[in-house]
Amino acid sequence: MLRCLVGATIGFVAVTLGGCGRPDPAPAPGATFTLRERVAALALRQSAFGSISVIPVRFEHSRIAGPFQDDGRTLYCVSSRMMGRRFLKGEKAKAVIREEAGKLSILDDVEEVCEGHRTEPFKELEALGNAKS
């Protein structure tokens, strides 16, 4: 009896916590998203941007560089400061996103690719990220 109760409790906790990540915003029917909004949504699905965080995070000072060409690839560099998971300390989240024929994907080489490119404020990331929390 006790074994069944413990198993049921563990199952309930696993199912409950499984849905605690950041859900993707449901697109409106027929809505078209700008490329910057698509880049922001892809960045927010990465664990570096708190996608699997149980604690809500807030985004500040988000920046984007790009599009720029690097070895024939079209890239965007995204960075933001996340607040909320550490007491009075921010975390710096970074991602490099590749665009190829309209499809977006994440690259692993963050540091070297993004050096020396001009950035600008990325309000789309803050709007999407802060609306979820």
Image (spheres, grey):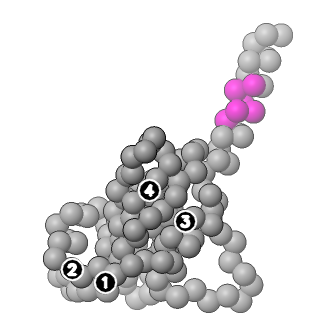
Foreground tag (4 vs 2): 4
Q: Is residue 3 left or right of residue 120?
A: right
Q: Residues within 10 Å of mark 2 (few under 14, many from 20)?
A: some
Q: Residues within 10 Å of mark 4 (few under 14, many from 20)?
A: many
Residue pointed to by mark 4: 82
On the question of residue 123 being in view, the answer is: yes
Foreground tag (1 vs 4): 4
Q: Which amino acid lies under the numbered mark 4 shown in the image of this protein?
A: Met
Q: Are marks 4 and 3 in contact (CB under 8 Å)?
A: no
Closest to the observer: 94 or 80?
80
Q: Which amino acid lies under the numbered mark 2 shown in the image of this protein?
A: His
* Quadrant of the drawing holding the N terminus: top right
Q: Residue furthest front?
A: 88
* Quadrant of the drawing holding the C terminus: bottom right
Establish if 118 lies above or below 126.
below
Q: Is residue 109 left or right of residue 101?
A: left
Q: Which mark is residue 117?
A: 2
Q: Are marks 1 and 4 in contact (CB under 8 Å)?
A: no
Q: Are marks 2 and 3 in contact (CB under 8 Å)?
A: no
Pick whichever of labels 2 and 3 is earlier in the sequence: 2
Which residue corresponds to the image point at 26% horizontal and 64% vertical from the top-left? 110
